[in-house]
Image (cartoon, coloured by chain):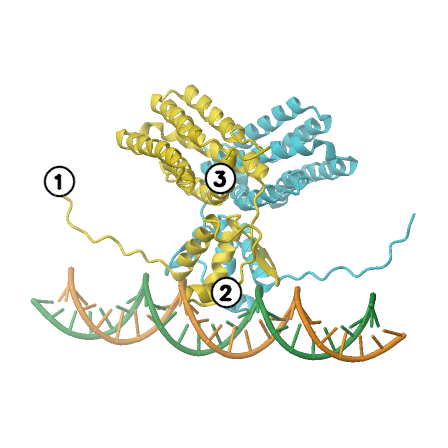
Chain colours: A cyan, B yellow, C green, D orange
Amino acid sequence: MSQHPFMFKQQANTSLREKVTNDLREAILNGHLAPGSRVKEMEVAEQMGVSRGPIREAIRQLEREGLLISYPYKETVVADLDAEEVRNILIPIRHHIEWFVVQRYLHEMDQKFFAAMQAIVDEMREAALNGENLRLVDLDIQFHQTILELANERTVLLTWQSIVNQIRLHFSKNLPYYQLDHFEKDHQELLDAIRSKDLPKIQGAIAKHLDSDDNLLCFDRPLR
Amino acid sequence: MSQHPFMFKQQANTSLREKVTNDLREAILNGHLAPGSRVKEMEVAEQMGVSRGPIREAIRQLEREGLLISYPYKETVVADLDAEEVRNILIPIRHHIEWFVVQRYLHEMDQKFFAAMQAIVDEMREAALNGENLRLVDLDIQFHQTILELANERTVLLTWQSIVNQIRLHFSKNLPYYQLDHFEKDHQELLDAIRSKDLPKIQGAIAKHLDSDDNLLCFDRPLR
DNA sequence: TAAATGTATATTGTCAACAATATTTATTTG
DNA sequence: CAAATAAATATTGTTGACAATATACATTTA
């Protein structure tokens, strides 16, 4: 085996704006900034110790990600997602691009890929048992993202980025309405179908997964 | 019939940033800024007679719309869309949300709506005859947007906004590969199906429309 | 001459001050 | 007192200057 020569890891050249965007997004997804609550530029800027420039650029980006809503000359508030819209529009979009990627990149799914996927599903069981809700949401997102990252296509990733955080926020908000122990089961089934590399079977599994995302909801009352 | 009291139309409170975003977007869609070409902040700012602040915010927005690509500390360039990605990802997304909206808002489609839609299709014939290519693309977009605007749902419109300009750019770029006279025919068929208010029939028509968007392409050589 | 190093220039990133707009509070006026 | 008006405050929008980074060019050095 050939020895690689030592190399320094490339310095991450993250601009302030990027860090601000990430921190702001995180705060929204954590629920630290509640839906409907106002986001004041100066307040955020002072807390982060930066000027308003990067904050404003971050706002423009998060606006497009569906997390913020800006009313010109007035204010910007955290978006309050409509559960039905997410279920009827965004999640089906996720399934569509997923199906596209699976079809096209099935042959690139190797042992390493399946190991990573299985690890995610295994963690889901743990998280469900321990009642780690947000971790469960993270793993769900990670499961689907791992598939999508097989395709290194700009449009796939851009589309994913424009919906992923709304989906994440939706699940965080509505997790009390989902049955936690179904996460592992549903994703295991989907993963097994993909492992079989039998396209019609996979298509069925994806369709079924879509249904389960829909039907796990029990809107009359929270399950917990 | 009751007379509405006279009211002045609300002044459009468009910020500079918004105007910049629109102008920049227009320049890209017109092909005035070619795919791959660099967008220098100072150059744009000077030409528009504004400072760089609004320009930078516009860039963040257009980045999310898929029209620009920004490399931090380096440059931002006009996106060069991959025709296959648009056809495989974005156009199916359009059809999906369209199908969703049609299902849900069928009952709100009145005489006025159908008249507007028919007018668009009629204009398509004219445009095709006169070889007004960009007009044809505009009408195509307008046709589908008119449907989507029935739903005043945030997620529908946000999703549409995040794909519409990429689709428009795609058609502008690839119009030489499409058969102009098919536009009117395909959209007339779809419109007629919707007019029938027969859901299975509509679903078929939408599926067929998707196919025609795909198959009109003739990648070996431009048709003109 | 070619590789490495240093310098100049162009461009993007950030900031702090100022302008425009919206909201709130105080004041007037019938 | 209630409605209308005016002043004060808070917040967003815009700008021009300065800082950080990358690229292009010139210089050194073997």
Q: Which mark is residue A204?
A: none
Q: Are marks 3 and 2 in contact (CB under 8 Å)?
A: no
x, y percent for residue B42: 51, 66
Q: Nearer the viewer, residue A145 or C24?
A: A145
Which of the two discs, 2 and 1, labels the residue nearer the N terminus? 1
* Left or right position of A80 against A49: left
Mark 2 belongs to which amino acid?
Glu
Q: Nearer the viewer, residue B64 or A120?
A: B64
**Which chain is indicated by disc 1?**
B
Q: Nearer the viewer, residue B168 or A168?
A: B168
Q: CA distance from mark 3 to mark 2?
A: 28 Å
Which of the two discs, 3 and 1, labels the residue nearer the N terminus? 1
Q: Which mark is residue B2?
A: 1
Residue with the mark numbered 3: B171
Q: CA distance from mark 3 to mark 1?
A: 45 Å
Mark toward the viewer: 2 or 1: 2
Q: Which mark is residue B43?
A: 2
Mark 2 secondary-structure assignment:
helix
